[in-house]
Amino acid sequence: MRIKPDYLVVGSGLFGSVVAQNLASQGKQVLVVEKRYHIGGNCFSELDAETGIEYHKYGTHIFHTSNETVWNYIQKFTQFNDYHHQVLTLHKNKIYQLPINLETINSFYNINLKPYEVENFLKKELSKENYINPKNLEEQAISLIGRPLYEAFIKNYTSKQWGKGPTELPASIIRRLPIRYNYSETYFNHARWQGIPLHGFTSLFEKLLSSPNIEVKTNCDYFDLDENLKKLPTIYTGPIDRFFNFKLGHLEWRSIRLEKHVMNYSDFQGTSVINYADNDVTYTRVHEPLHLHPERNYQNKKTTVFYEYSESDQNSPYYPVRDEDNLKILAKYEERAKEQENVIFGGRLGTYAYYDMDLTILKALELVNYIHS
């Protein structure tokens, strides 16, 4: 081992890498162990050998934030391009804007509302079927946007994404559905800053972990480590139920499978992500990473495309299914976690929570402040 570690960080995703970087900057020696062959967690990016296009191996990731602390921190390690995320959805062989905006509504209903007319129009739709106390995702969505828009853009997509019907999912999953009364097409409409790291996400992680006080071991499973290393003060970012060997039950996770294709077109779909809202298509989204780096001006006759399928996978967890049953199991694990004297649980998997990248960074910064308080 190159260093004599003061801390052990399990996982080299965004949370673990930010924690490691901050500890190292304070003179601490940090060992980062990563089960995968690469750093960066689900943000990892690499070049496609055939097309030279940089792609996100685990699905499209867009950095966005309005938090000045986070923005000032992350800019120390990367510049961002000026990519602004737009999401389209295909329903009955027609493309619509998401989130639902004035263009979506007018196109779907074949009308021509003005911005000041949208609110009254939707009130009439909601009056046809409304739930004061929604009991599930379906009732919640209908209460927000009405049944026609729900059935077109939410119902079947949700079933594919979560592997359950909307009536089986808690209302909390979809407490808010953004609706815009104008033609704004930027997905992260309220984010002050957004974009893709200019040299790719992997370059960002390489810089985060570049300190001589950090040693990174990839292809290294925490559970195979020497017991002496496990006695180190540890920041654990893996699945919390796995840490306790599932003794209190298995938490439910959703995962994705990406099917890669190289197409003989310079541009296949004209945008980075298109959702597929209907059940007659088994995949949920199609990604075309060509569009994430417009500044590179790729001049290819081929493009790389990824078809995304949602599935349940305990071994490759992405999204927590935070319904009532899973939250009961989580509460038991959280009590057990409090008993761990030298282990802090963090990140999406360690806390069984869905965090955007900026919130992940913020929580990592807060943790380091807590450690040294």
Image (tube, rainbow, N blue to C red):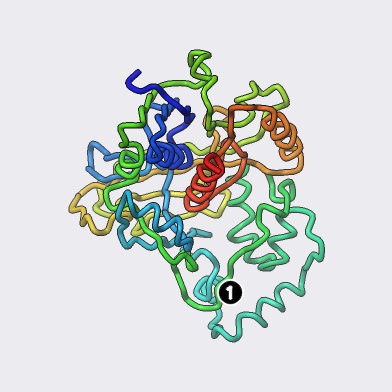
User: Would residue 261 be seen by someone viewing this image from the given angle?
Assistant: no
Quarter of the image for residue 201 reads top left
On the picture, is 156 further left or further right than 166? left
Task: Say which residue appears at 41% left-offset and 63% top-offset.
Answer: 193
Where does residue 171 sit, x and y in percent of width and height?
A: 72, 54
Compare residues 221 and 115 and report the one nearer the observer: 221
The answer to which quarter of the image holds residue 14 is: top left
At 67% from the left and 82% from the top, the residue drawn is: 120
Residue drawn at (71%, 56%) of the image: 138
In the rendered structure, which amino acid carries the disc numbered 1? Tyr
Measured as percent of width and height from the top left, residue 332 is found at: 74, 32
Question: Furthest-right residue in view?
Answer: 133
- 261 or 136, nearer to the observer: 136
Q: Is residue 179 rendered to the left or right of residue 199? A: right
Marks counted in the figure total: 1
* The N terminus, quarter of image: top left
**Up-down: is 108 above or below 74?**
below
The relative height of residue 250 versus residue 324 in the rendered view (above or below) is: above
**Figure check: 236 above or below 22:** above
For residue 11, above or below residue 359: above
- Assign the C terminus to one quadrant of the image: top right
Q: Nearer the viewer, residue 224 or 6?
A: 6
- Give x and y (percent) for residue 133: 81, 61
Q: Residue furthest left?
A: 299
Q: Is residue 319 visible?
A: yes
The secondary element bearing badge 1 is classed as helix
Residue 244, given in percent of the width and then of the height, sits at 65, 23
Q: Which residue is mark 1?
A: 109
Q: Residues within 10 Å of mark 1 (few under 14, many from 20)?
A: few
